[in-house]
Amino acid sequence: MAKILIVEDNALNIKLFCDLLAAHGHQPEAVTDSRNALGAARELRPDLVITDIQLPHVSGLELIRLIRKDEDLAEVPIMAVTAYSAQGDEERIRAAGAQAYVSKPISVVKFAQTVDELLTISSEEPGELPESMANDDDGGGGGGPGEAGGEEV
Ligand code: MN
């Protein structure tokens, strides 16, 4: 079960996305006013953010950039949903920092598939380098010649 933050101003889409995600065993939470989205994300610490692009106040693109700049949220996967797919849109959305892009009206199958893919990727990704790899000159190797230098009597 994943916590998923939905940022969407259209009530019917919110209902659709929430129903779909709940049917897949996830825990969706929706924000309708994008001005509240960053705060909600900081509080919820979602496993995935799904954001509309055409939003009043803070656009989806701006929101994606804000999330990417936030040190606590920078790694959260983002899926953008947009009604317009003008040329260059997908590039702009990906350049802003979203991993995936689904156009409206959404295909239920594609939507669910994309959610699954993003959740799988993010759970496989190691959060940070293990200490043994980051710091390799001191006590590394693990199975080296025992207590060499460890105890000076
Ligand atoms: Mn919208």
Image (spheres, rainbow, N blue to C red):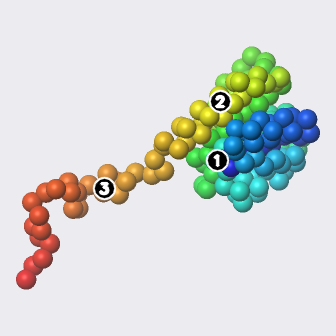
Q: Do labels 3 and 2 touch, CB within 8 Å?
A: no
- Residue 62 visible in the shown view: no
Hey, which quadrant is residue 143 in on the image?
bottom left
Residue of label 3: 132
Outermost residue, top direction?
A: 87
Residue in the foreground of this view, choosing between 54 and 14: 14
Report the residue at 67% width, 39% height from top.
Answer: 78
| Secondary-structure class at tag 2 | helix
Above-or-below relation of 123 to 150 = above
Question: What label sits on residue 1 in the rendered view?
Answer: 1
Report the residue at 53% width, 44% height from top.
Answer: 123
What amino acid is found at the position of numbered circle 2 in the picture? Thr
The numbered mark, 3 or 1, whose residue comes first in the sequence reads 1
Residue of label 2: 114
CA gap between label 3 and label 2 equals: 34 Å
- Residue 95 percent across, percent down from the top left: 64, 31
| Secondary-structure class at tag 1 | loop
- Residue 37 percent across, percent down from the top left: 79, 50
Above-or-below relation of 59 to 88 = below
What amino acid is found at the position of numbered circle 1 in the picture? Met
Task: Please rate how many residues cluster around mark 1, counting C-alpha atoms within 10 Å: few if below 14, some from 14 to 19, many from 20.
Answer: few
